Image (cartoon, helix red, strand yellow):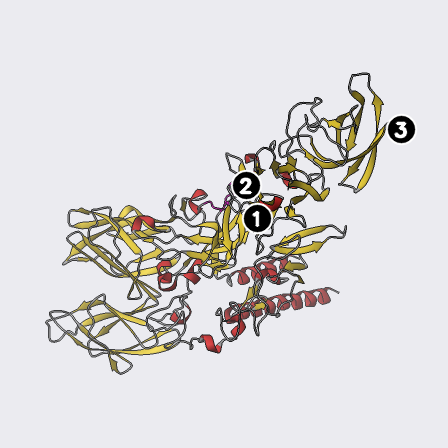
Amino acid sequence: MRRILVFSFLIASMLAFTVEASSFKVETSIDKLEINEQLSGVFSSLTKSQLPELQEGTITAEGSTKFNQYIRFTDTISPKVAFEKNDDNIISDYLFVQRNTGANNAFFEYELEFEQGLQSSISSGTLTDLEGKQLYIFNEPYTVTLATSTGNEVELHLVSGLASTLIEKEETKQITVNGKTYTLKITSVETTTKKTRLNVDGVDLPDLLKGEVYQLPDKTYIGITKVLTSTDAGTKDIVEVFIGARIIKFKDSNYQDSNFEEKVEINTVKIKGGYVRITASMIDNSLKISKIKYRLVSFDDIYVKKGEKISQYMGEQKAGLLGNMDMRYEGLTSTATNSISFTPGSNDQEYEIAFKNREGNTFSNIPFISNNGALKMGSTSNDLVIQENVLIDQNDYFVITDRNDKTGTSYILKYNSIDTSAQNVKIYDYATSTEKSITYANSTIAGILGTGELTIGSLKANMTINGSSGNPLQVDLDLDGSFENNVVNIVTADGGILVLEALSGSTYTVNLRTEATQFEENATNENIQFVFETRSGDAVGIQSTFSGITTQTKEGNTLGLSNYGVSMTYADPSGTDAETLTFLYPQTQKFAQVYIDVLASAALQTPESNSTVFSLCANGIQDVGETGVDCGGTCVACQSASSLPSCSDGLQNQGETGTDCGGPCQACIPLKQEGPCPTGCLVYGSDGLETCMDLGENTETIYCGKDLQIKLKKSNGLVCEEAYECKIGICEKGECGKNITIPALLLNIIALLAFFGSLIYMIKTLLTKV
């Protein structure tokens, strides 16, 4: 048994090396990222405790210093998850980065801090103690190939994936990088300028000064680190040559001020919107650097869809993420929802309400408000009574609610009839679709025929029967034991409160309230306000403006999402027909799922002296010479739009009526779907009740697809677009399942061999004992 545990541990350890990135979810155990909350609201600063890839350690130059790394977010500019309409006119929730200008409007800041100061003496403008030293940016080691300071200016060149070698003039030397061997030769060195002529594989490169780099045809960067010249005829000049995967240049023209300067280059390309500030001080003839801060400003609004990363939308600014960092959006947390809807009647004179109460009872097709020459609660012929001092006539509807807060339970009932000879009142219960007979006792009070107790579900309300014509009722609607002038609310499932008011005038305002205590950290109630209004021809409608919720409009229809996670659809049909208003109210608050990703540092292999392994064709950056990200030039050819399948090329072409839909492709998804689930899928439970699933919501066996239809989850190998379509929850390169890379495959084979080896050993041991 002990051997099995040991081998299991070895297998788990080996498989752990296949991890390609580290991720940190922006949340704590007591503080989750809310909708419309900026990342800085949860974390203003990330350190090694949140992201292990923010390396800490010690650097020795002219003295030693501890270094720390931070990622920071500002209060006003940092990314947030918001309900937006993107550049393709698609309305959804996105991880949103706002376009801006100026270093103070960066959407993140990176800092490399030196606690005791990174100190170096200065010789002829060179920070001699820094060159050749190794720094870290995130988890990636960088070698300082150039460090200069003239006046108040500081310039640093940092190279990752460094392989270097010393070559004498006229000497030929080989260096192997990424499995390719380069033959290097120094053909000339100018004594005064120290310009060096370097020959690579028989081809002379342009003259290079110390710190300058050149990109070879295979996109590898080569440059000069040191040049040692000699006037002694018997001593040859010596040049240190390096080859690197990524080169970062920081330059600050005045290290004494607090200004950020747009002087950052990555792989010889200036980063637009990339700003640096190097904080330093002079001590005798030494420069002590205390901080290097870098900020990135987005020049465009960025809308990151669920399952995607910021880097996919940054274009030429992508390299500004400093190579290894990214931000990923995985959508809102999934929680079941209940529908609250207001649907117009056939003649547009009435609106009906449908909802579910906290006891799980469903109410539908109940008249809520109408226009019969003026606004009135209920239908044109019968009232909906929500106020205790209003008498309830036969065929009227009325609301009872035991508490007007989130813990309340509401029912809507109808007074059907009365049988005075049998002393009972007939009440229709919409929760059970049955008629209840309520017995009352005769009363000796003038004007009162009798009194009784109305029991519905868990609620009991006092009731009096008026002795006037028709025997109207008066009911203790709020169950407080008295008949007052109170107005009751309608409390829906999961605590959503429809706050009602006594009706007067030609408009009627309703608030869908979520109490502050339902939020993780909200100090005030959320009130989504909407307004009913009278229209010509005794019609009634809902105004198109809303408050307390973020809305976006497309083709006359308005969609909304509140900070709590209430989604709204305001469907405005063509012509003069009345609108439909539907809310999907979540069982619990929805939170935004945002991750900070840091790619694993490339494993640098040194099979022989001065050799290393890296690949610029897989670094996620459009380097100089590439015509696309990791393609074109000396990498694999980039696919053009015309060579990709038309129905998945991200373009509206070849007869499509929308982007990758319509015409020869699958039908385009309409903005809204008729029925009880306008923006999701209708599901019938085992109890026969209807519920709605949001687009992308899924269970172990089914999911709500982009065509707003319920589908079975797919097995590995089947074509997919989103992770939620797959049983395993992973969709890579258009197929369900995890794509296995060659290194991962080799490690898995090793793990399997180890497992079977241990199994055979155990069997032999057992047979020997037998």
Question: Number of labelled discs?
Answer: 3
Q: Earlier in the sequence, mark 1 or mark 3?
A: 3
Question: According to the image, label 1 marks what residue?
Answer: 568
Residues at marks 1 and 2 touching, judged by CB atoms closer than 8 Å: yes
Q: Check disc 1: other Cα within 10 Å, few if <14, some if 14-19, many if 20+.
A: many
Q: Residue at x 48, y 50 (%)?
A: 81
Magenta residue check for 32: yes
Q: Quadrant of the C terminus?
A: bottom right
| Viewer-proximal residue among 434 and 414 | 414
**Residue drawn 66% across the image and 62% down it:** 711
The answer, for residue 338, to whether it is visible in the render is no
Dot 3, how many residues are within 10 Å of its Cα: few (below 14), some (14-19), or many (20+)? few
Q: Where does label 2 land, which residue?
A: 528
Q: Amino acid at mark 1?
A: Met
Separation (CA) of disc 1 from disc 3: 48 Å
The answer to whether 206 appears left or right of 431 in the picture is: left
Residue beneath the point at 69% across and 30% down: 402
The disc, 1 or 2, on the residue closer to the chain's N-terminal end is: 2
Q: Which residue is mark 3?
A: 422
Is 618 or 647 nearer to us in this picture?
Answer: 647
Residue 126: image location, x then y, percent: 18, 58
Q: In this picture, which residue range is highlighted in magenta? A: 27-37
Label 1, label 2: how far apart the Cα atoms are: 10 Å
